[in-house]
Image (cartoon, rainbow, N blue to C red):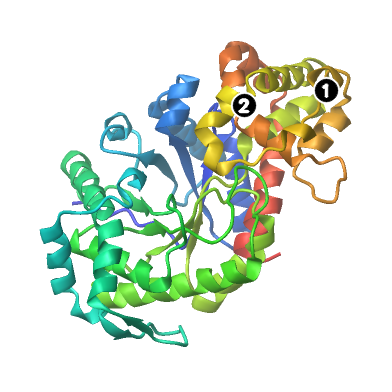
Amino acid sequence: MSKAIMLPRFSVGVGDRFAHQAKAQLAACIKAAEAGVDVVPVWNKSNREHTIIGTEPTQTRAAADVAVASLGWKQPYLVDADHITIKTVERFLESCDFFTLDVAEEIGRAAAPDDVDAFVARHPELIGEVRIPRIAEPFHTTGAFLKDVANKFLAAVQEAGRIYRFLVEHKGEGRFVPEISMDETDSPQTPIELLIILAAIADEKIPIQTIAPKFTGRFNKGVDYVGDVGQFAKEFEEDLAAIDFAVQRYGFLSNLKLSVHSGSDKFSIYKVIHEAVVKFGAGVHVKTAGTTWLEELIGLAEAGGNGLEIAKEVYREAFAHAEELCKPYATVIDIDYKRLPQPEDVSNWTSEQYTSALRHDLQNSAYNPSFRQLLHVGFKVASKMGQRYLNALQENEEIVARNVTTNLYERHIRPIFIGH
């Protein structure tokens, strides 16, 4: 058997909805390598996005392969079947080598009572005083507490096991990187809850390489973190400690690391992520970094002419269909509709007015997070333009690519992985 696929220490999940920016995204990883830090790209696209745009995972794979060949990238790279379930996994089998197992629907659904009782019986080490190295205070638990946590998460972990075994059957063991997403739940997991979840994952024999827990605060699409940065820093460090302990206690792969979902543009927490990762000598995966689709719009608007007209048209249509576009993303956007500019006003904007409102620059008083969030979920409008939108990207490739690369490297990779 060939060598198992192992995710390196630092990785960045990049979306490329229209499969035109892979080279520009890879250029940012090349800049990181030139600065002395290896950050591998993981191109991710969900089943929902493929369905909305009318694309297939083979196109995401092809774009990544072409970029890697064109730029001479010699490091690993992966293609992520983002948020797949047992119902949607099949279309990703051929093209993907990273699978984010989405078990959100099962979180909170009680597992079979016999399974819960068996889990509690298997893990007496999780009852009583539980000490996790590098967390100052021990945790004090009871059998009833362990049973409650198992009732909330065990069914979800069992479902992840079902998807994982399907993948092994069809792709082969070690031929993909499994990640489990546990972030779509009401409240953050405590370190002891994360440890219990990891024990359940170990019981299912899923060799996960990343796990995405729920953190305090709002991780809205394409805008900054909203919440208590100090509390986030505490949770992040404690989760790193829980993972370290689980690697030793339950035999996970040594590269197991945290994954931060909807990690794009969370500028206020990048410093604490970097500091925690350095402190623990840990790795991290930041998913959906760089909001590439919005950088395409910024590039088109900056180009002026037809590019600016297309950017204005996208906003006009997104404004007209805001309710429909926002509904699938209701839990990860907070739009103040009173702050949305009227389309007739936007139609008279200059390139600078459009890009100032859209570009995530907190120093610019014209920046409008509601405008940005609506356009973030408005990619469906561009997909309906079909070839007209893709032609505009090709005609303005240089200016669009510059925005994509600069945003991903300067605003994301540098602060998270390099520490500048």
Task: Count all numbered tags in the image, as a single digit.
Answer: 2
Residue in the foreground of this view, choosing between 342 and 49: 342
**Residue 370 image offset from top left, x and y in percent:** 72, 37
Circle 2 Cα neighbour tier, 10 Å, few/some/many (<14 / 14–19 / ≥20): many
Q: Which residue is mark 2?
A: 378
Query: Considering only vertical position in the picture, is 241 above or below 292?
Result: below
Three-letter code for the amino acid on which mark 2 is drawn: Gly
Work out which residue is located at the far front of the displayed protein and give it.
Answer: 144
Please indicate whether residue 348 sits to the left or right of residue 386 in the image.
right
Three-letter code for the amino acid on which mark 1 is drawn: Val
Q: Which residue is mark 1?
A: 346
Query: Considering only vertical position in the picture, is 355 above or below 304?
Result: below
| Mark 2 or 1, nearer chain start | 1
Circle 1 Cα neighbour tier, 10 Å, few/some/many (<14 / 14–19 / ≥20): some
Q: Residue at x 14, y 66 (%)?
A: 117
Q: Is residue 11 visible?
A: no
The image quadrant of residue 122 is bottom left
**Residue 292 image offset from top left, x and y in percent:** 62, 37
Query: Considering only vertical position in the picture, is 357 above or below 28?
Result: above
Q: Looking at the image, do the residues carrying marks 2 and 1 touch, with CB atoms under 8 Å apart?
A: no
Residue in the foreground of this view, choosing between 249 and 12: 249
Residue in the foreground of this view, choosing between 48 and 287: 48
Residue in the foreground of this view, choosing between 151 and 102: 151
Q: Residue at x 85, y 27 (%)?
A: 351
**Residue 184 image offset from top left, x and y in percent:** 43, 49
Q: Secondary structure at mark 2?
A: loop
Q: Secondary structure at mark 1?
A: helix
The image quadrant of residue 244 is bottom left
Classify the position of the C terminus by image quarter.
Answer: bottom right
Q: Is residue 283 visible?
A: yes
Please indicate whether residue 167 sits to the left or right of residue 368 in the image.
left
Q: Residue at x 55, y 74 (%)?
A: 234
